[in-house]
Amino acid sequence: MCGRFSVGLSATTLANHFNVQERVEWRERYNLTPGGEVLTVVRLAGGPREIRRMHWGLIPAWAKDPAIGTQLINARAETVAMKPAFRAAFRERRCLILTDGFYEWQSQGGRKRPWCIRMRDGHPFAFAGLWERWTDPAGRAIESCTIITTTPNEVIRPFHHRMPVILVPQAYELWLDGQIRDVDRLLPLLVPYPPDEMIAYPVSHLVNNPANDSPACQAPTE
């Protein structure tokens, strides 16, 4: 699964990296948790890429209670095309969820130690995501998203039996094109990322507390 990650880069840096013209207000975040705001990239009706803030935890358009989003922070790649909560978004509303690292925990001596997983070159990267727009009875809209997960690669396997789907940059255009609804073209993208391009290192227990949100959460420890 993916339950905690960081976006410790400016909106300008992210927009440049992901080829987005518009900017959004964004403060660097180092300890993002479900239910909070994350940064996404979408592409609507063949238009240009757009960067948007979204609620992490998918709220399907048909939901009666937005609290359902707390149960839908992740979607399994094996069933995402079939599950009622995800299948419409999978065909029509796919997004990139932007990050520069995520966290996993490993049991050591009866205590769980946090680790940060990043790209070896330090560049930002993108989780494969789905998004929805939910409207309450008063007409107020919430845009929300979920992160797709798959089986782990060799880097993640010591920590968890699932990992977020990390898209290779060459797949971004296909993934963002909402006019492509062919499941057989999309599902092959949802595979473990090449492990030789990733690193994992232990970090401080500061990250265990969501109130801690500073670069120290990502700093390596011995």
Image (tube, helix red, strand yellow):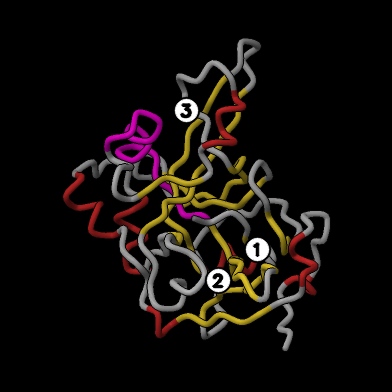
Residue 7 disc label: 1
Whether 47 is drawn above or below 134: the answer is below
**198 left or right, relative to 82:** right
Q: Position of residue 202 (x, y in %)?
A: 66, 80
Q: Please report the bounds of the magenta region as a residue range.
A: 82-97
Quadrant that contains the C terminus: bottom right
What amino acid is at disc 1? Val
Whether 29 is drawn above or below 55: the answer is below
Query: What residue appears at the point 64 percent right and 20 percent down from the top-left corner?
Result: 140
Which residue ends up furthest to the top in the rendered image?
Answer: 137
Which residue ends up furthest to the bottom in the rendered image?
Answer: 222
Q: Which residue is mark 2?
A: 124
**Earlier-in-chain disc, 3 versus 2:** 3
The answer to whether any part of residue 195 appears in the image is yes
What amino acid is at disc 3? Pro
Quadrant assignment, res 212: bottom right
The answer to whether any part of residue 9 appears in the image is no
